Amino acid sequence: MRPTFLIRRRTVATLLATAAALLSLTTPAAAAPAARPAASAQVPAGVTAGVAVFDRQTGTFTEQLNTSTRFRSASVVKLLLTLDFLWNRGPAYSIPDADRARLEPMLRSSDDSAANHYWSTYGGSAIIDRMVSRLGLADTAPPPAGYPGYWGYTSLSARDTVTIYRYVLDRAPAPVRDFVMTNLRQSTRCASDRFDQHFGIAGAFDRPWAVKQGWSGKYAAGTCGSGTTTTATSATTASATTASTSTASASATAADVDLVRPALHSTGTVGAGDRSIVAVLTLHPEGTTYGKAYTDIGRLTRSLDVPGGVRPAGTWFGTWGSGVNVRPDASTGRDPLTKLPDGVEVLVGCQKRGETVTVPPYTNDWWAYLPQYGGYISNIYISSPGNQLPGVPVCGTTP
């Protein structure tokens, strides 16, 4: 009887195993929760960032990082100053010549004197209150108590910035939309205060793009283009007489909005038909140079998933030196086109031999072409071993 029992037990076990195997073929195992994709935003060390990228084609966000965090707006508030002035101007939305002469450089070149005029003339903080109500902004607020003239201390967030652009593009009367976006598409490289403002969006993507940038902090004097140097300070204000309050006092009064650390913001649209709205708001450690902040916001913006955005061809390199000249050709014989922010990262398209440049202990006759500047700098100022840049084609040849 023992052998028969063993056979039957093995038979039952075999049948059970077979049934379990068949069941596993027809009944899928419970799926593990899908891993949430990591945000692609790569925030450089020491930088505080609020980021939002909205794809207007799909109606979805592709990037969201600290979207409700409030930053001091710096010059991004000039969008609200413009919209407030244009609000309900009648069927034609005609703009007087005197105002056109202020608004255009305010949007294109971030002119501060124009912002001072509109802030002082149309109610200061009341402008912000009106626009918060009109656009349904969640995080935007006037400057802190005690700083009524500091229009750059208006607070806003990445998500509110997207809301502002969505209003301009989708709800604003056509004359308002066309006026604002046409000027933002014509953003000048050199701002009115001689700071190079083609960082972030403007450096990370080929046109078409439209940008309104912002910067605020104790940066060294701007050197872009030619003219009198200007220093960016921690207080962007419509009244010079109210700018004497110390930054320590400002920080204590500002609640959750940091008024001390250097700010650099890049906002606007990218791609054909303004497909993506991009808001990148950043704060940098105290003492950060403009070139370092410029480089960091560039790296952050290039890391983002921006539908419709086209990356420029070339290779990014760091630079060193102060006031490096961008020349129209590979020599020092002609006046420079502009100067680079100290220590900024640049996009190199190609390189070629030209005039020999000596900065002891270095000597170099290779020059790098910077397509985003339309000119050349000596390779001596590029942080790379050797006179010729690795992986960069010679100008006029196929890489």
Image (spheres, rainbow, N blue to C red):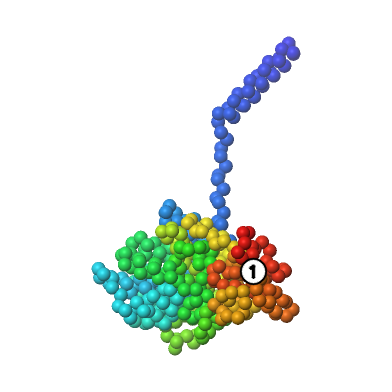
Which quarter of the image is occupied by the C terminus?
A: bottom right
The percent position of residue 104, horizontal first and vertical second, equals 39, 75
- Horizontally, is 28 left or right of 128 in the view? right
Who is closer to the viewer here, 79 or 30? 79
Who is closer to the viewer here, 220 or 321? 321
> In the displayed image of the protein, which residue is found farthest to the bottom?
241
Question: Does residue 351 show up?
Answer: yes
The percent position of residue 219, horizontal first and vertical second, equals 56, 79
Disc 1, SS: strand
The percent position of residue 33, horizontal first and vertical second, equals 55, 44
| Residue depicted at x 56% and y 33% | 28
The percent position of residue 386, horizontal first and vertical second, equals 72, 69
Question: Does residue 136 show up?
Answer: no
| Residue depicted at x 43% and y 70% | 186
| Mark 1, other Cα within 10 Å: few <14 / some 14–19 / many ≥20 | some
The quadrant in which residue 295 appears is: bottom right
| Residue depicted at x 26% and y 69% | 92
Type of amino acid under label 1: Lys
The quadrant in which residue 347 appears is: bottom right
Please name the residue that numbered disc 1 is placed on: 352
Who is closer to the viewer here, 332 or 222? 332
Which quarter of the image is occupied by the N terminus?
A: top right
